[in-house]
Image (cartoon, rainbow, N blue to C red):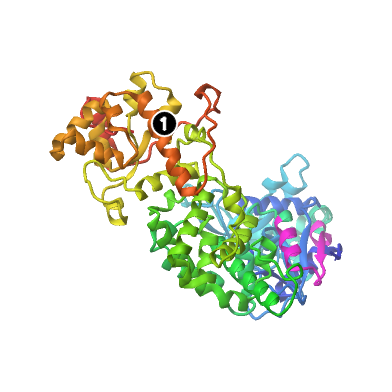
Amino acid sequence: MPFDSPDENLGTLLQEVANGKVQLPDFQREWKWDTDRIGSLLASISLDYPVGVLMMLEVGGSDVSFKPRPIAGVPGNVQAPDKLLLDGQQRITSLFQSLKANEPVATTDPRNSKRLQRWYYADINRCLDPNDDREEAILAVPEDRLLRTDFGRVVKADYSTTEKECAAETFPLRRSLDAGATFEWQNEYLALHPEGQEVASAKWLKFYNEVLKNFVHYTVPVIVLKKETPKEAVCTVFEKVNTGGVVLNVFELLTATFAAGEFRLNDDWKERKARLARKHVLQELQNTDFLQAVSLVSTYRKRTAAENSGVPSHSAPPVSCRRKDILRLTLDDYKAVANDVTRGFEWAAEFLAREKIFRSKDAPYRTQMVPLAALHALLGQSIDSYASAEKLRRWFWCGVLGELYGGAAETRFARDVEGVTAWLTGGSQPRTIGDASFEASRLYTLRTRNSAAYKGLHALLMKRGARDWMKVAEIDQAAFFDLHIDIHHVFPRKWCDDNGVDPGERDSIVNKTPLSWDTNRSIGGRSPASYLKTIEGRNDWDAGRMREVLGRHLVDGETLEADDFEAFYRKRKERLVEMIASAMGKEVARDDRAPSTMPEYEEEVATPQPDEELAAALVQSGEDGAGE
């Protein structure tokens, strides 16, 4: 990756900014430095201290075509840029606005709570005092050039004319890089001190040599990447050197690339996001998720086309959604598949709803929606045939219960798009099914929504027929939201604590089931034997009917009636293992270990519920209350 590393004169560099020779790539975020940081930067330059290296990119490369935009404060109608500033936007914008633009700097207070307009001055006497703090000698003055005190009622200093600036011995730094303007100010300054011309002249000369000359002769080290540098290298370098501290994602970088073709990717995504967010489970979908699906579909089609034209498999382009492959997407690639991918995510939401996953927070893996959407985009309606749907569900639950989609999963995305597509069209089963495994002991450590398998088991219980104990109806999407269904304890926490139940078993998914908030409040902290009588009484059920309803939750009614937690836990664990094996289409490893040998577990964080304060009060009073 060839590059040059010249030292650029500050005045020359800011002139190139002014005429547009140096601009920003459109993916750069807005300038945002506060007035204290600008003052500190100016103080550093006045002392000839280094302020860091800039990084630029030559324009005109065949692989990089970012849309440019002028640096903030530069007037319009500038020429096409020669270079784009990759790193150093905050510094260069601050310097351009304070030293070159001849307009007050649009900045903020240090807390970014108030917008300000400021001119910057150097206090000559304080700059020449070796014991003074140079940053204190750089003054930030309001737009009207009046410094006030007493809540704005008293004018402390007036710099509104050149004569008043000279009288106050405060030099306007906006003149520092303009020799003619500096000379004009110098003459007026000296003319104001006819009786002390020699003293004033000596002071001015000292100020010029020790302070102003540092601005005039200041040089900035610059690394200039050659235009031949590939796009992914440019983006990687940018992120590694960016001193703003905010890492750009591939969506923002691709936005800049597409902007060169006059396409507003961000606007396009906003429309698609609004459409997709109508599905509750898709409300946390990210723009990078969408681009990954686009990349998977685009690269799959390119690979298929290459193989169909006779290119050997080992030479055909790979299916991928890695960063570098997303950055290689062209605008035509995006437009060709974006609508199919949008429909794919909508279908993925419907698929998840059939699996009883209705909310974004209950989705085991947001990332698993990416290959789901891509698969629908590639296979269309054929994915909903009975045979395909059964296979797809097995693949999905193997990914969830095998907990295979955590962390960086781009490689698995690509493997699954190829493998599942082949499987659904007559090939062998995908690798994810082979990789997936579940150990019975894992049930002990599934206690919070931090675990994909925990959320998965919650959904599977509803899918196999679990219904609320008070509102005995199928839990479809409407009932789920209307009844505030969530994961609640079977043996309440309070009862478990009072009866010495192991905290790990108490909070395990084995002791959890989908219930409405009302039902959970009715359970309170009472024993199962007690709350079952309340439920039976309210519903006019006998014990047999109650056991039937409990059975849909894989709960043994007799153990609840006897308040026998140990027997309940053992039997329900076995039934959950059978449910898991059925969903995955493979045996569960029987590796049970004693709780004392298991890892430490996280304390469960209660899920906010309607009327939470009322529920808490009821628990404290000993009445019906939240069992969680």
Horizontal side of residue 126 vs 263, given as left or right? right
State the image coordinates of residue 565 (x, y, percent, origin top left).
35, 25
Residue tagged by mark 1?
507
Q: Is residue 190 above or below residue 408?
A: below
Q: Is residue 78 above or below residue 520?
A: below
Which type of secondary structure does the marked residue at label 1 adopt? helix
Q: Is residue 209 above or below residue 262?
A: above
Residue range highlighted in magenta: 214-239
Q: Amino acid at mark 1?
A: Asp
The reply to whether residue 605 is visible in this rendering is no
Q: Which residue is painted at 42% across and 49% down in the image?
A: 362
The reply to whether residue 527 is visible in this rendering is yes
Q: Give the image quarter of residue 246.
A: bottom right
Q: What is the tally of numbered marks visible in this picture?
A: 1
Horizontal side of residue 207 vs 77, given as left or right? right
State the image coordinates of residue 23 (x, y, percent, origin top left).
70, 71
Q: Is residue 335 above or below residue 49?
A: below
Q: Give the image quarter of residue 385.
A: bottom left
Q: Work out whether residue 430 or residue 428 is closer to the camera in this orientation and state it.
A: 428
State the image coordinates of residue 526 (x, y, percent, origin top left).
26, 26
Image quadrant holding the N terminus, namely bottom right
Is 62 inside the magenta-drawn segment? no
